[in-house]
Image: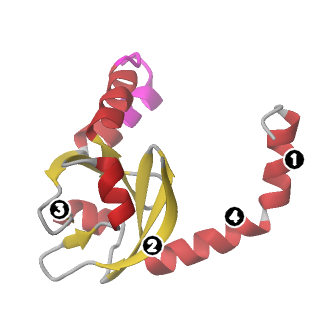
Amino acid sequence: MLIGEYLHTLDSKKRLSLPAKFRKEVGRTVVITRGLDSCLFMYPQKAWEKIAAKVSGLPIGGTDTRGMSRFLLAGAVETEVDRAGRILIPEYLKDFADLKSRVVLAGVSDRVEIWNEKTWEEYKRRIEKGADQMAQTLGDLGIL
């Protein structure tokens, strides 16, 4: 399971070193795509195959499902984890998430989210303020 929060540096060649714990979990090939809330989603190959199959199965008649399919699938890139444990972030994805030199890698169960450090801090503060309400909602659903 991918969990935890790590601050890393994106080098001038757009390479990002993965935390050692994540390297063990994700394997040699990962898929990076546009994520939600202005971050990138990075999936291990097997997890991505499950997501892609679900998204590919969405009906194309609906504007939202067509748009989400394009958002996730057309924006995706498969990349190898190099011997030094780094991945290459393509320019268009770097721009999408407004990645600067300092980025946060957040493990979220089956994926790693890659965030601009400042965007992550702002998002985290906002979410932390609403944690009690989110817990109540999850409690009402029988999850917590």
Q: Which one is in front, 76 or 30?
A: 30
Mark 1 — residue? 136
Mark 3 — residue? 90
**Circle number at residue 6:** 2
The magenta stretch spans residue 33 = no
Quick check: 132 above or below 28? below
- Give how far apart the Cα atoms at labels 3 and 2 are: 20 Å
Residue drawn where x is 20% and y is 81% of the image: 11
Part of the protein shown in magenta: 57-69
Quick check: 33 above or below 18? above
Quick check: 62 above or below 3? above
Instruction: Please state the horizontal and vertical placement of residue 87, each as a whole percent of the image.
Output: 20, 62
The magenta stretch spans residue 61 = yes
Three-letter residue code for mark 2: Tyr
Pointer 2 or 4: first along the chain: 2
Crowdedness near tag 4: few (<14), some (14–19) or many (≥20) residues, C-alpha within 10 Å: few
Mark 4 — residue? 127
Instruction: Please state the horizontal and vertical placement of residue 140, each as a whole percent of the image.
Output: 88, 36
